[in-house]
Image (cartoon, helix red, strand yellow):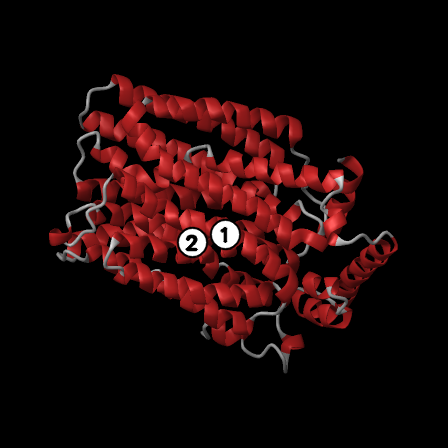
Amino acid sequence: MPSPIAAAAPLGRGAKNRSPGRLILISVFVATMGALAFGYDTGIIAGALPFMTLPVDQGGLGLTAVTEGMVTSALIVGAAFGSLASGFLSDHLGRRLTLRMLSVLFILGAIGTATAPTIPLMIAARFILGIAVGGGSATVPVFIAEIAGPKHRAPLVSRNELMIVSGQLLAYVLSALMAALLHSDSVWRYMLAVAAVPGLLLLVGTFFVPASPRWLAHKGRFDEARHVLERLRDSPEEAQREVDEMKSQAAQAKKQRVPARELLRQGWVIKLLLIGIGLGFTAQFTGVNAFMYYTPIILKNTGMGTNAALTATIGNGVVSVIATLLGIWAIGRYGRRTLLMSGLVVVVLAQLALGAVLTFLPANLTQSYAALACILVFLLFMQMCISPVYWLLMSELFPMQVRGLLTGTAVSMQWIFNATVAFAFPLTLAALGNTTFFIFAAINVGSALFVFFCLPETKGKSLEAIEKHMKKEL
């Protein structure tokens, strides 16, 4: 059987004989290498931190609570900058070239973190890696949404989330295996070095996928857009209908054409951006990344050993992958609002239960497994109902003329919220103890109210239809 890369190679000669569905899947597979790297880079820190906190003479970096938060959040701060910058670049240079540039940063950042001899250099390398992670998080969903048709957009974009959680699961499994098998003071460096692999796959893969047809159409290159769509759709007629719809929208937009700066001042666009930012707050202040980054630390506080805590954390990744697969099934059948509201209700209950377990049960093995059970229930509904819907909405909500910029801005704010949680969680846990989880529950009640009153439904509409609907309704 040929490899996916080899199968994708002849995009020029003979491309019209290729199965459209196969080419779409290959393109999604390549693009989501960025999501795999995103997941691995955010997940591997959970396994590396217990070893990085060891003294320098024992192979660690001697991290304290403050520098632990700085190393963890440096990637996330970089991601905020990366998502914002990639939004601008993807609008001007295209989604494919932007992904190619980001792949180089993935590779350089992974090598930098694996070889950093001091805390400042580690923070700098994590920041560079974060630029790539953030850029990929803003660009990959948009690229997938723009090559997929309306019928397949939801499940295909949701594969981005599947690859994120698969990367996190891979990180948890490898960190546990390496900790058990590699009796080395520098085991954490090997954990971090593996992150270069998906970056390399992304770099190679971008030479074998087509450009975004909607980006080409936005640049007035309709013949090229039709040529790409003929490879991606079941028939030339279907491709032509899509091109005609894009031409019609472009002609209408030309009649009512306003410069991008003026469009960004229009009330409906500002409301969409605020909704996008609010969704980022909703996703991050569930507290999900407090668990993804710090579950081993939480479990160690209940008396569980380091290797046992790392092994238990694999459950986070397994549940996240299963939940995302369920989410891909559900997202094609239920509305975005319904899934978000359902997920938030269970998240609130899981946070309350975790706070109660850690507060009222004695520190023993029963408490450890009860706490892990609460975390896994939380992750099941978070990764099934909230995370996939968030990334899907980031690819749907914003108008084509400024889609890259607004997606980048909204995702950038999501990364800032992520960094806030990542940096503040260990400090808050040290200062307030288990009350931290009750605070998360209260915040999530507010997020549920925001979703109920502010989020429009986008299920079943083309990207062009969504834009018309938003302009009319907001």
In terms of secondary structure, where does tag 2 sit? helix
Count residues near mark 2 (Cα–Cα under 10 Å), then give few for <14, some for 14-19, many for 20+: many
- The residue that disc 1 covers is 81
Q: Quadrant of the C terminus?
A: top right
Q: How many callouts does the rendering have?
A: 2
At 53% from the left and 42% from the top, the residue drawn is: 413
**Where does the image place residue 470, in percent across and percent down from the top left?**
74, 41
Is residue 35 rendered to the left or right of residue 261?
left
Q: Nearer the viewer, residue 400 or 117?
A: 117
Count residues near mark 1 (Cα–Cα under 10 Å), then give few for <14, some for 14-19, many for 20+: many
- The residue that disc 2 covers is 130
Q: Is residue 369 visible?
A: yes
Of the two numbered discs 2 and 1 in the rendering, the one whose residue sits closer to the viewer: 1
In terms of secondary structure, where does tag 1 sit? helix
Is residue 389 rendered to the left or right of residue 175?
right
Q: Quadrant of the N terminus?
A: bottom left
